[in-house]
Amino acid sequence: MNDPTWLVPLPVVVPLFGAGLALALYRKPRAQRLISVIALSLVLAASATLLVLADGGPLVVDVGGWAAPVGIDLVADRLSALMLTISSAVTLAVLLYSLAEGDADGDEAAPVSIYHPTYLVLTAGVANAFLSGDLFNIYVGFEILLAASYVLLTLGGTGERIRAGSIYVVVALLSSALFLISIAMIYAATGTVNLAQLAVRLPEIDPGVRLVLQIMLLVAFGIKAAIFPLSAWLPDSYPTAPAPVTAVFAGLLTKVGVYAIIRTQTLLFPEGRLDDVLMWAALATMIIGILGAVAQDDIKRLLSFTLVSHIGYMIFGIALSTTMGWTASIYYVAHHITVQTALFLVVGLIERRGGTTSLDRLGGLAKLAPVLAILFFIPAMNLSGIPPLSGFLGKVGLLQAGVELGTPLAYTLVVGGVVTSLLTLYALVKAWNKAFWQTPPAELPDTRLPGGMIGPTAALVGLGLALTFAGGPLYAYTERAADALKERSPYIDAVLPDGVRGAGESADVVSDEAVIELETPAPEVTP
Amino acid sequence: MIDMSPNIVLVVVIGVLFTVGVYLLLERSLSRVLIGVILIGNGANLLFLISGGAAGKPPIVGDAPVSEMSDPLPQAMVLTAIVITLGMTAFLMAMAYRSWQLHRHDEVQDDVEDRRIARLAAIDEHAFTDRDTEDAGETLDDEAAETRDETDEVLRGAEATASEDAGPADADGDAGSANPEERP
């Protein structure tokens, strides 16, 4: 038990187990709630421990005892542990929020019995995508979380949700098919799907083929991360779902795509041949996304557009291909997960209080619900990067990294980033004015907001603030993570300790006889 | 090692599956999209299968020399991918059925933003005349009017109730676009 690697599979296994249990207890909503809260708390505890442990070096688990290149690995390095911790904190907060919402609606079955199992499966999928050490397992993680997201998005099966869901599902299926095709082509070219072994073998193949593989992976992940021009599906699908579901989608699902881009770009394709393309894509994502947001008069849609726009910042950091850029990018992802989720939760509260999310029909909320006003104000300012907050730190890091690179394109992006930031401020201030200050066009319903819903929202807003106060240590941590990404060797050595190309034998599982049998006909066992 | 060059027939089959699949994906009817997804999924699985090289002896230790075995890894992965495709197909089918239950058709409808922009364009239209389209017969608006779009009616319905009592509508993600002034 002294070996801490047993912690690594927990974020995947615990929610899956909990989901099975919750599904079996579908007639007992209370037991279901208890199970999901316990499971997610355990995941949060395990991820936080991993966050500390992974700082000493990547933790690797060979699932089923099969050694690296043949078996499936789960790898927790600094990047994945950080993503895991932030995402499990967010999922726990959103779960508590949705529980309180169910209570407040007075209907015990309000989140239908399928809600809890699906939600747990979603977290398991996200954790699997963050932790897995081979491409195919990342694909499986994606499919787990996407399947859960389809169910959550169309929860209840109302006409509007089916309409939004059908576009979302078809786009997601297409991107999954693309991902699968690229995995097949990578396997055909290199004979492996293990990330560490791919990092060793990819430089050996034809550069043209490598470029094709890189493009295919980027397109597949780009759809999931909603990078322009692959982002059109997002602003239409997210706003129709229930508020907690939208919040968790906005916080996590696109970030899983961003994570996959960071992982594959840094580890597999370190030469960065597509950096210029990525920079243009980042610029277009930022500007076009935020212009979309400015044009909206519905808060949910407005926020969905800012989500698209701010993905551009992360891609900008990745495209810089410098340690500074990656540091800022990773920090920005962590910041954005908390802030965007908090904003969507607040909008859920606004919708509850004001009865609508249309800015034209809201008004006067600052007087009616001052707590709500503060809860909206802090993450909104955080998102637009007002100085002391974490969004500012992340943006400054990105701009510095851009200036450090110093190419004309990088400077263009720096300017684009500043403009986007200002436009975000404009869009959010407009929303703020309309929702909180203007005279309400119609009498707003007199409802009380349940404290159980305000609590988790406040906790997430607080987490966003904590990222500011802990900005120094966190930034140092992301810097170490980016260093490891730049070097690549810590990851590869941790997964393939016995040699650069990997032996493909699992000494601790295969009996001596089998090894002899394997070796007598021909010594070469590499796939 | 076994021959790594792929079978040309399989490559052609994969090409055909992808082509037909993409064509069907671009259809508006969800059940055709579903068939497209199935075809693309099968194409991807076949592609995965041949990525392990040509068929060899069964990969059972002791049955054949290792050098003649086929690679079991892609087969294991294809198996997983097939199961996933099956699950997704089932979900998409359920969704197409639900759509049919609700609307008596399973069309994938335009998103709210598209319709909003079309509506704004219609408001602006009388401000200028476009000589290029004058003799083209049917305009895009005529075509749009003919296309059945039930969410539009749902929208109008929601708007009507909203203006009456400003009460919470269940699906008001797009209610903001349904201003009375904006109606053409």
Image (tube, coloured by chain):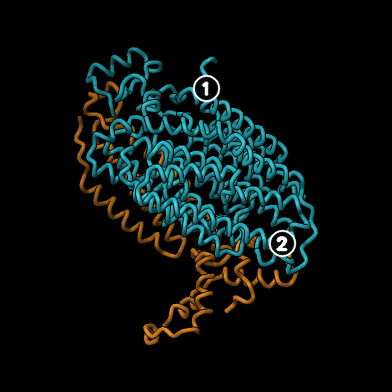
Chain colours: A cyan, B orange
Q: How many marks?
A: 2
Give SS at disc 1.
Answer: helix
Viewer-proximal residue among A506 and A432: A432
Viewer-proximal residue among A523 and A461: A461
The answer to whether marks 2 and 1 mark residues whose Cβ atoms lie closer than 8 Å is: no
Residue A356 image offset from top left, x and y in percent: 68, 61
Residue that carries the numbered disc 1 in the rendered image: A6
Q: Looking at numbered disc 1 in the image, what kind of residue is underneath it?
A: Trp
Relative to A506, B94 lies left or right: right
Q: Residue at x 22, y 19 (%)?
A: A521
- Label 2 and label 1: CA atoms lie apart by 53 Å
Q: Residue at x 35, y 34 (%)?
A: A193
**Chain identity of mark 1:** A
Q: Looking at numbered disc 2 in the image, what kind of residue is underneath it?
A: Trp
Residue that carries the numbered disc 2 in the rendered image: A437
Q: Residue at x 32, y 44 (%)?
A: A214
Q: Residue at x 44, y 34 (%)?
A: A482
Viewer-proximal residue among B7 and A388: A388
Relative to A106, A361 lies left or right: left
Residue A506 image offset from top left, x and y in percent: 37, 19
Residue A215 image offset from top left, x and y in percent: 33, 47
Return the residue found at the far top: A512
